[in-house]
Image (spheres, rainbow, N blue to C red):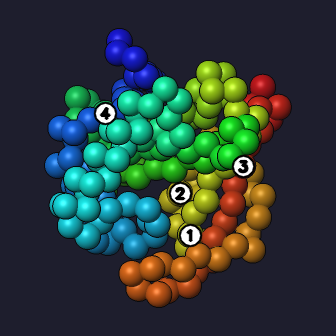
Amino acid sequence: MKKNELFSGRLLLRPVELDDTDAIHGYAGDQSIAMMLNLPNETREETEAFVRSAVSEWKKEEPVDREYVIVYEGKVVGGINLAYSESREVVEIGWIVHRDYRNKGIASEAAKRLIDYAFHVLSARKVIAHCDSGNAASEKVMKNVGMHLADQRGTRVYPKTGVVSGELLYEITIDEKR
């Protein structure tokens, strides 16, 4: 097992590598995904820059942003991320799974493993996640991993389209996880 690799049942979660660019562009470049805020989904060049940045972050002594790929049956099928707040007591989690691998419990399994890692290795006190209010699939994952709705009054603006949408905030604390 390599440093920072995490296993969970059927999945391997490992830090993003430069060789993952094509696989990442395969799911991040899916133009039908309009509800993802921070993914480089326009061009392969955007994806390459994203991957280089993620790889660079992993080289730091204490990464603030931990971008993993989700490997299922030997294939990169998605990504999952943990990002620290300034206090480092709260981390935000987010995920994406290639459309050909959705509805298989992959996002929930990966999120459960990463939440456990956040609490027991990174010493987080709370894990949060945001989603577009219309993103029922991500909301379902949040509920599946034991998170509860903390705020439904948020809004988000999609920079490329100018569309304004509702935003949900889910969370789970270390005390709830025990």
Q: Report if the CB atoms under discs 1 and 2 are less than 8 Å apart.
A: yes
| Residue 112, above or below 86 | above
Residue 166 lies in what quarter of the image?
bottom right
Q: Tell me which numbered mark, 1 or 3, is placed earlier along the sequence.
A: 1
Q: What's under tag 2, amino acid-wise?
A: Ser
Question: Label 3 to label 4, Cα distance in Å?
Answer: 25 Å
Q: Secondary structure at mark 2?
A: helix
Placement of the C terminus among the 4 image quadrants: top right
In three-dimensional space, the C-alpha distance between marks 4 and 1, rounded to whole angstroms, equals 25 Å
Instruction: State the mark number for residue 171.
Output: 3
**In the image, residue 174 lies at what x, y percent?**
77, 32
Distance from label 1 to label 2 (Cα)? 8 Å
**Residue for point 36% across, 68% down:** 33
Mark 4, Cα crowd under 10 Å, few <14 / some 14-19 / many 20+, is some
* Mark 4, residue position: 71
Q: Which mark is residue 138?
A: 2
Which of pointers 2 and 3 lies earlier in the amino acid sequence? 2
At a point 22% along the width and 53% down the height, the residue shown is 48
Earlier along the polypeptide chain: callout 4 or callout 2? 4
Between 95 and 51, the residue placed more toward the observer is 51
Hey, what amino acid is under mark 3?
Glu
Q: Earlier in the sequence, mark 3 or mark 4?
A: 4
Q: What residue lies at 40% left-to-right and 73% top-to-bottom?
A: 34
Which label sits in the foreground, 1 or 2? 1
Inspect the image, locate mark 1, and give the three-letter code of the amino acid beneath it.
Answer: Asp
